[in-house]
Amino acid sequence: MRACVMRDHKLVVDDVADPRPEPGQVLVRTLACGICGSDLHFLRHAEAMAQMTDELLPSMGELGGLATMQIDLTRDIIMGHEFCGEVLETGPDTIGPSPGSLVVSVPVLLAGGRIHQLAYNNDYPGGYAEYMLLAAPLVIEVPNALDARRAALTEPLAVGMHAVAKSGATPADAAVVVGCGPVGLSVIAGLRLVGVETIVAADLSAKRRALAVQMGATEAVDPRGEPVVEAWRRLDGRRPLVAFEAVGVPGMLQGLFRDVPPGTRVTVVGVCMEPDQVVPFFAIAKELSVQFALAYSTDEFAGALRAISEGDVDVAPMVTGAVDLDGVPGAFDALGQPDEQVKILVEPTSA
């Protein structure tokens, strides 16, 4: 099969071996796969990401022993973890969806008694390939004739919904969201789903601010002209505030500590890969609550698919481009231009 392979910190399109399903696995044809910001980071900083992951795993107990990255960066890696595919066949003695079914899955594969992260391992391809193997118990059929492009955004929407759940946001709250990339936009959609009425977003990109309003923000501001907390005070200023940091750049968290009112609940969902200095006094003096959020549960993943398929969330505006496998390297470059692109889908094969 053809795949876009990470090799020597570069992306190259090459022919690789076709995967074959083992017991408990499903073989799918990849129809759509979103390019995630973590993939951009991994291409540039794979050694640091692998090292940090391996450092934290001993503190994670049994799960850490099961889910270690175990990546050999001298070998090929096929990324892509926001995917929708068409079932081709199931492995021996495996019960799964019938051939032709459209499916999504949390991006892990159960094999050899271990949990393998799809997209960040040497042995199993992610969604930047024509075919993938999925764990049959984790596969979910796509309902309501939902198309593959929308279904592929189940994963990023689940990230935002999980962050909202961690924040404890309710209709009694107002919210500010700093950063309107795919994660910030998914947070905005998640806030709307739980009934938050006043949502103020901030981003330097005019395109992303416009998308924030499409996804449910009350207003989106350029922080160079009006700080997001000042905009919240102008629009609301009375409800308890929940704040989301969805940028992952040093200095953003301290900026929220400085600006938000006392008692604010701050949820960090932007993944900062560098040391980030904060001054605890600001959070202590205001008695802020700080929550960090990553990924989602299987129930939240299923809930995200349900929200998309039932029309509760329209993820279509988030998709700003699509490429075939040959276009993946250029798409990685294009995503560095936030005024042009937000979410680019890779479509390795057609249905």
Image: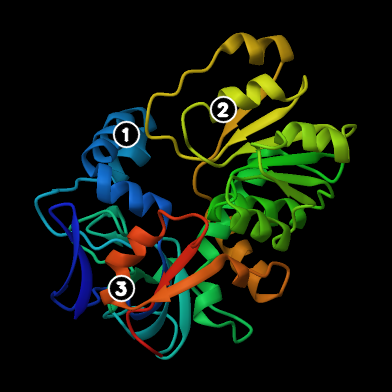
Instruction: Of the two numbered discs 3 and 2 on the same chain, state the one appearing first in sequence.
Output: 2
Circle 3 sits in a helix, a strand or a loop, which is it?
helix
Looking at the image, which is closer to me, 130 or 188?
A: 188
- Amino acid, disc 1: Leu
Quadrant where the C terminus lies?
A: bottom left
- Amino acid, disc 2: Leu
Q: CA distance from mark 1 to mark 2?
A: 25 Å
Expressed as whole percent of the image width and height from the top left, the position of residue 76 reads: 14, 59
Residue beneath label 2, please? 253
Residue beneath label 3, please? 327
Quadrant where the N terminus lies?
A: bottom left
Describe residue 208's horizontal placement relative to residue 98 as left or right: right
Residue beneath label 1, please? 57
Expressed as whole percent of the image width and height from the top left, the position of residue 46 reads: 24, 44
Local crowd at mark 2 within 10 Å, few (<14), some, or many (≥20)? many
Expressed as whole percent of the image width and height from the top left, the position of residue 161 reads: 63, 52
Q: Residue at x 65, y 16 (%)?
A: 283
Q: Can I make out residue 126 in this image?
A: no
Circle 1 sits in a helix, a strand or a loop, which is it?
helix
Looking at the image, which is closer to me, 79 or 57?
A: 79
Q: Can I make out residue 253 in this image?
A: yes
Circle 2 sits in a helix, a strand or a loop, which is it?
helix
Q: Residue at x 25, y 76 (%)?
A: 21
Q: CA distance from mark 1 to mark 3?
A: 35 Å
Instruction: Of the two numbered discs 1 and 3 on the same chain, state the one appearing first in sequence.
Output: 1
On residue 28, the disc is: none
